[in-house]
Structures are given as C-alpha cells and as structure tokens.
C-alpha cells in the first residue's frame, strides 16, 4: 500500500492510522480527502476514498468550501507542514479563528521534502551533521509551534504526536480517534500534527531518523493533547 | 417584475436566477456591490456565503464548493483577480466548473478604481500557469448583467471549466430599469459532484495524470469551445465602410456614434464580441474587403485590437481609439472617423 512513498516515510503510517479509524467508524462512503501537493500528492491514486488535489497551501479553503455545501460528509484535510504552516498559514489561522468544521492532519517533518529537503518554518535545525554536537547554538525559538499560535482561538481539538515507535504510533491512533470523535459529534476545528520521519531527506536510516525524533526533535516539539473539548 | 439596478446588483440577481448555491468573496472596488448583495441577501435565497480573508481564499473556497456539485461564484477586480489565477488554472486542468466575475479596474498593479478594459490579455490568454483558456463573457448593459450568469454557469458545466464574466466599472455602476428573472435553485447532486464512494473512488486531479490521450482531450475541449461558443452582437455591418469593435461601455458609445455617422451619410457599423474567448471571428465574415476597422477600447496596449487583427488575419485596415481610463466621447469618435 502507498507504494509511491519512500521506505520509512511517515505519510504511510499516518494514512494507515486514518484508514483504520475510518474503517472502525464505517464512514468510508462519506469520506472525502483533500490532499495538498508535494509528498502528500504521492497518496492521491492509492487512497481508498474520493480525493481532491488542492493548490499548495489551500487545502483548508477547498475543504471548507466543500463542507459548507455538504455538512454530512467527513472531510479530511491532509497536508504537510509546508502547506499548513508556511504557504497556508493564513487559512490555518482563519479556519481556527472561526472554529470551522475541519478535520486536519499535518505531517510535520520540518522540511520541504518533495524538492529535496529545504528547511520549512518547522525545521528544528537538528540534522545528521549536528546531531551529536551542542544544541545551544540552534535557535529553537524560531520554530513554528502550532499550539502557541492557535491557543487563543476557541478550537475543539489540538494534539501533537510522533510517528516513531509502537508506543508513539499507538498514541497517534488514540489522538486521531479522539479527534474524529469530536469532529463527528460536534464539529469545529480539530487538528493533529504528526512529527514524521523523512529518512530520504534527513539522509539517515529509518532507525536513525526515528531516534533523531525521539531523542532530539521531541525536546523542541512537545508531544500531547493541547486542546480537547 | 421590473427593478432599477446597477450592473453589479443585476449580476447578483442574474446569478440567483442561474441557481447559484455558493458565493465567496473579498471586497474590492469596483466589484464590491456583488459581495455586499450576497452578504445581505444570502439567507433569504438559500445561498451559502463566506467572507473570505483574501481573494486566494475566495477562489479556493469556490473550488471546494464546485467539487461538492454547487454552482460557485466569486466576484473581484484588479489585483484580486490576479491572486485567483493559480486556482483558476487548477480548475481548468481538473475540469472543475466555476464562475468568476472580474469587474475591470484601471492600470497594472494597484492602479486605480476607474473604468478600464485592461485585463483582456490576462483573461483571454489564460492568466495562470500552463496550457489553458477560460471562457470569457463580456457585458455591456444592466440587461446583459442579468442574463450572463445563466450563460456562464451553463458553459462552465458543459465544458467543466472556469468561466469569467467581465465588464468595466461604468457598466458596474450604471443604473437601468430591467425586468428581473425568476429565482432558481440548483440541485447540488450533479453527476460530477464528489460525494464519497464505496468502491472505485473518484478523483479530482489534473486530468493529465490519468488521461492517456491527454493531448487529444485538451485539444478537443478548446476546439469544441471555439467551434460552438462564439457569441457576438453586430449592428449595421452589412454595408458598412467603417466597423467599430468595442465592448462594455465603449459599445454603448460606439452605438451612438454609428447612428450619428449614418445620419451624416457615413456607413458605419459595430461588432461587439460577447465571448472575448473564444473570439467571435465569424462576426467579420461578411464585411467588405476595404472595410476600415476601428477598435475602441480602454487600455493603452490595444489589447482587444490585437485579437481583432489576428482573428481577421490582418486583412483590413485597423485603427484605434484607446485611452487608459477616460471614456471617448461620441464627438471624438465621429471626428476621428471623418479623418480616416
Ligand atoms: S521524501 Fe520524505 S516525505 Fe517525501 S515520500 Fe520520501 S520520506 Fe516521505
């Protein structure tokens, strides 16, 4: 499944979790997935639901336009950190401000992966070159942490998980399931960010990339649920 | 029932008669009346309205509403229209219908809010990236503004492509007494709506990814549009020595100039392209060989004239009366024609 993705890619784990939850809820026939471009678009022919390829950074707006006319559908807005927090940050803010019915999944690997791993506003500065060196030089303050940005809005769900080991993947499943529960029951803005390996661009083995997240990146990005309503 | 409306209000009323389900917009002069109309009236007519936070957002909201099967509309001007080009290009390549009103304003960049016809290049040649055209419909009266949305949605759905309706700010703000049409409701369960699938999921993507005969599909789409959808008005062109080509407010002025010139014994006529793309080249088929064509337009680069020359194969003598924003007067046009 999802054969277009590289080995060890977090997108595969994320989609598998979403697949499992959609199956458990029995909502396949009313699910539409709105995908962003770049590595998200590698899923577009493999996912089992109707899908729409949106312009870069515009997933939330296209999803909103759809949802306004079809309230009964499960609309999944699936994007990377570049789309969600760089080029698309404006619509992220305004969808949250209005607490509009959104079920958003953000795959955060800190990089613009499709184009070769340039740094996104979410890049921690930690990569294979400085993994063992003193991190005090790195400017973690510059990293965009979505919980800081969205905490003043009246949104319904916000969590961050990591797609690393079993424990973390199980926690991701629990969070996304809770997100779905809130979205189905009362709607509103619901987002889970998934810290995700991209071994290709971190130029590491899968294991090294997962260790990098668990041992380093998670010190910058707090894992957990920030808002649950 | 008759009502006194300006062009923008009439366009909004016309959109209701065309069954519009969804309006997303960001206010910008001179198109703002359309936004205001839907802001105030959407509940009454069961239209979903959203005040977008940018034109980029507005057009992408329309994209989503269209995918849901709705008749989606946005209205904008100037730089707002520029911001929409990426999504328009996406919709053209994804075969998603949508209607965009572009009330032209003066100049490049910010320009100004004065009347202009300076977006002809941008609208007719694509405007966004890649190999596509949008169908472009032009209005010259409040009556046109009422009628055009229905034609626009019909064409958008027939070819599953974005359609742009355009006029200048004079037509936007002129008030005329017009018969309004019955309001219609469009059922969003159209055959191209994405509603979820049990098996064989549907995809809205660039058709290039899947269509093995993509070259042919694309060629056919635009050939069919060019073959079937040319629209124009012509007046007194049969025996004309002078033929004006003019759209929007310039049509109205040239129409009067034709009558004045005829009363002076000068055989003048006028052709008004209603579809700026596809350009109505058939309108020129029966002109006399030595006809002088005078293109009257509100831009400096003679944007309309370029298409007129090209589609009439450069075989006539061409003249221009063109200003950036100042309307030519009937007197000015008559004097000019007397000189040539
Ligand atoms: S480049 Fe990175 S994000 Fe993209 S498919 Fe490969 S591993 Fe996944």
Image (cartoon, coloured by chain):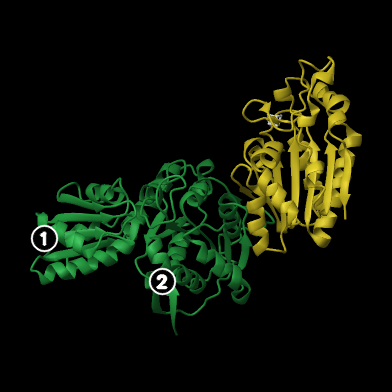
Percent across and percent down for residue B12 are 50, 69
Residue B241 got which mark? 1
Q: How far apart are marks 1 and 2 (CA)?
A: 32 Å
Q: Write down which chain is painted yellow.
A: A
Is B236 situated left or right of B199 in this image?
A: left
Looking at this view, is B209 or A116 the one in front? A116
Residue B136 visible somewhere in the drawing? yes
Residue B147 got which mark? 2
Q: Which chain carries label 1?
A: B
In the displayed structure, would residue A164 be above or below residue B84?
Answer: above
Task: Report the mark closest to the observer, 1 or 2.
Answer: 1
Q: Write down which chain is painted green.
A: B
Q: Residue at x 9, y 69 (%)?
A: B264
Q: Which of marks 1 and 2 is nearer the N terminus?
A: 2
Q: Give the secondary structure at mark 2.
A: helix
Residue A2 visible somewhere in the drawing? no
Looking at this view, is B43 or A39 the one in front? B43
């Amino acid at each position: 499944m999802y054969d277009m993705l590289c080995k060890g890619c977090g997108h595969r784990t994320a989609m598998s979790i979403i697949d499992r939850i959609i199956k458990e809820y029995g909502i396949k026939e009313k699910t539409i997935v709105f995908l962003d471009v770049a590595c998200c678009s590698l899923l577009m022919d493999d996912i089992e639901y109707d899908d729409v390829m949106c312009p870069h950074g515009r997933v939330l707006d296209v999803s909103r336009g759809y949802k306004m006319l079809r309230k009964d559908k499960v609309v999944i807005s699936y994007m990377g950190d570049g789309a969600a927090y760089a080029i698309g940050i404006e619509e992220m803010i305004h969808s949250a401000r209005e607490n509009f019915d959104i079920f958003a999944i953000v795959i955060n690997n800190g990089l613009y992966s499709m184009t070769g791993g340039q740094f996104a506003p979410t890049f921690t500065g930690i990569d294979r070159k400085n993994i063992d060196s003193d991190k005090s030089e790195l400017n973690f303050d510059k990293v965009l942490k979505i919980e800081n940005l969205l905490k003043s809005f009246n949104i319904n769900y916000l969590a961050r998980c990591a797609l690393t080991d079993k424990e973390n993947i199980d926690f991701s499943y629990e969070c996304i399931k809770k997100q779905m529960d809130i979205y189905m029951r009362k709607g509103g803005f619901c987002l889970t960010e998934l810290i995700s390996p991209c071994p290709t661009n971190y130029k590491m083995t899968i294991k090294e990339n997962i260790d990098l997240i668990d041992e380093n990146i998670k010190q910058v990005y707090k894992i957990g649920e920030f808002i649950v309503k | 029932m008759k009502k006194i409306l300006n062009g923008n209000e009439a366009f909004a009323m016309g959109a209701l008669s065309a069954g519009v389900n969804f309006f997303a917009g960001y206010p910008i002069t001179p198109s703002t009346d359309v936004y205001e109309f839907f802001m105030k009236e959407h509940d009454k007519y069961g239209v979903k309205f959203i005040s977008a936070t940018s034109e980029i957002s507005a057009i992408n909201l329309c994209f989503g509403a269209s995918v849901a099967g709705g008749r989606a509309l946005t209205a904008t001007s100037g730089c707002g229209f520029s911001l929409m080009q990426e999504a328009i290009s996406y919709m053209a390549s994804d075969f998603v219908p949508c209607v965009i009103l572009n009330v032209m304003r003066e100049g490049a960049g910010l320009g100004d809010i004065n009347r202009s016809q300076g977006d002809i290049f941008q609208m007719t040649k694509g405007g966004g990236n890649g190999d596509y055209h949008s169908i472009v419909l032009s209005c010259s009266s409040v009556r046109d503004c009422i009628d055009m949305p229905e034609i626009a949605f019909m064409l958008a759905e027939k070819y599953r492509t974005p359609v742009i309706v355009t006029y200048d700010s004079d037509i936007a703000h002129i008030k005329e007494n017009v018969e309004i049409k019955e309001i219609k409701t469009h059922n969003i369960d159209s055959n191209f709506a994405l509603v979820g699938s049990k098996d064989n999921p549907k995809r809205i993507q660039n058709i290039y990814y899947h269509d093995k005969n993509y070259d042919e599909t694309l060629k056919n789409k635009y050939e069919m549009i060019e073959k079937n959808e040319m629209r124009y008005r012509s007046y007194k062109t049969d025996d004309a020595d002078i033929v004006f080509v003019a759209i929007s407010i310039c049509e109205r002025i040239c129409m009067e100039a034709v009558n004045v010139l005829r009363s002076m014994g000068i055989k003048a006529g006028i052709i008004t392209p209603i579809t700026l793309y596809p350009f109505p080249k058939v309108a020129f088929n029966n002109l006399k060989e030595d006809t002088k064509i005078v293109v009257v337009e509100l831009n400096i680069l003679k944007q309309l004239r370029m298409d007129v020359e090209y589609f009439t194969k450069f075989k006539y003598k061409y003249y221009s009366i063109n200003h950036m924003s100042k309307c030519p007067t009937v007197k000015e046009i008559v004097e000019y024609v007397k000189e040539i």
